Amino acid sequence: MADPEKLVVTCLFTDIEGSTLIVKTLRDDYARALQEHRELIRQAIAAHGGKEMDTYGDSFFVVFKPPRQAVLCAVDAQRALASHRWPGGVRLQVRMGIHTGEVQRVGDTYLGLTVHRASRICDAAHGGQVLISRATQEIIEDEEENDLGIQFLDLGELHLKDFNRPVQLFQLAAPGLKRHFPVLQPPPKPPIHRISTDWSLWLARLNTYMGGEVEVKRVLQHEPEVVIEGVLSLSRRQSDFAANERPALKFNRGVAVLASTPLWDTEPVVLRVWETDYASVRALDQSGARPTMISANVLLVCGETEEIILHRRSPFVSRNYPHALHTFGGIYWPPEAGARGFDSLIKTAQREVAEESGIVIDLLPLPPLLLGAEPKIGFVHIALLGVNVSRATVSAAFTNIEGSIAIVKFSDLRDRLSSDAWVPAGKAQILSWLALGAPLGHERMKFGGHTGEEVFNQIVP
């Protein structure tokens, strides 16, 4: 299967504010109002060369290539909506959000964080307001598009739902558009999920069961602290080997390797790391000095359908355990300048799930964190146990060269854990989740009438 095509687009999302109240007010006339709303939006889309990607309920998702066309479309649509005579004398107020960035095109679908960020920008707007990201505003400003007759009002930074860092937002101001709105409000932060179960009661049993392939160290009650000690130094011979490897590597990204063995019982756990790259890791492997790398993994669960979503590894990219089932995840990259270490661990988890499946995950509230080691292959892993995804999200997931999507029903989990080929770390992570009671958000999952602890006890002696 060919890799998804990557391209830069501008995304526009629209949504009617207070639609439930409008339905109650208009009753049978709502269908007519909704159709008129759609016709006005589509006229603006057609006039500015937009491509309608999705329409659901009272919302639109549209993409444009030039950002200016998205902006002009939004302005024209708001003017048309504001001047329209609606049934029953109501006023349909439509919020809009615009963002520019890279997406993956899979068939007729566009995927990626750019799409989700644009949607969240729309969610933050008030009815009648158009918000755009700094990314979109800077492109238009750099192209000196001074003939638009539009102002960009700087509203400052705002935290968006599901995103760790705030984004700078601008409001479009133009003749015919409402100018004054209430101050934007960030979404409420849900509480961080904490586990009260005593993990020490089952940890020794699980490690004995795993036979040394995985050593589950602990369940974390606080995020680990990542300290960058500097750049990994190599011997002359290792440096020469790495220099010869780099031109042949298709992907030679920066990675972090442990600088020292962590003190597993400290609070918080501190991971001291050196920055390096894949070529240097190969050089160390070749010389027999295998480094310990860090991975961030995510156990995806669809509570709606009572299924666990897994990754079946491709033999083309996985020398260890080809065709085996695993949680989603990948190698931790060093943090960006100014970022906290754990922020980048979270970013690694989100990035790997998106790259391996196309699924964008919500990590609030933060699920239980499992810390484990894989001594045979030289890894320490941080696993996020029990991240809920919707049925619609799972149905849009895709397969790529890294592997395929594997779905295990709750009712089949016990048998599948005993019969399928597993990456040991992935199996240990699922068993740990069961031992903790199979938490998903603020609920506990059941498996054919059995609790997570009962399933764990049926499998692990």
Image: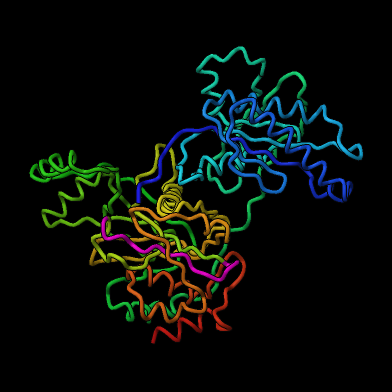
In the image, the segment drawn in magenta is 303-316
Locate residue 319, reporting x and y percent. Answer: 23, 60
Membership of 283 in magenta stretch = no
User: Residue placed at 60% from the left, 66% from the top?
Assistant: 304
Hey, which residue is sitting farthest right in the picture? 88
Residue 155 position by quadrant: top right
User: Residue placed at 46% from the left, 51% from the top?
Assistant: 358
Horizontally, is 133 left or right of 272 in the view?
right
Q: Is residue 197 above or below residue 342?
A: below
Decide which of 61, 447 is in the foreground and name it: 61
Horizontally, is 321 left or right of 332 in the view?
left
Q: Is residue 225 visible?
A: no
Locate residue 233, reporting x and y percent. Answer: 18, 43
Decide which of 314, 123 is in the foreground and name it: 314
Q: Is residue 397 visible?
A: yes
Horizontally, is 249 left or right of 70 in the view?
left
Horizontally, is 111 left or right of 416 in the view?
right
User: Residue placed at 46% from the left, 71% from the top?
Assistant: 408
Locate residue 99, reporting x and y percent. Answer: 56, 34
Membership of 313 in magenta stretch = yes
Residue 172 position by quadrant: top right
Q: Quadrant of the C terminus?
A: bottom left
User: Residue placed at 61% from the left, 70% from the top?
Assistant: 443
Decide which of 244, 53 is in the foreground and name it: 53
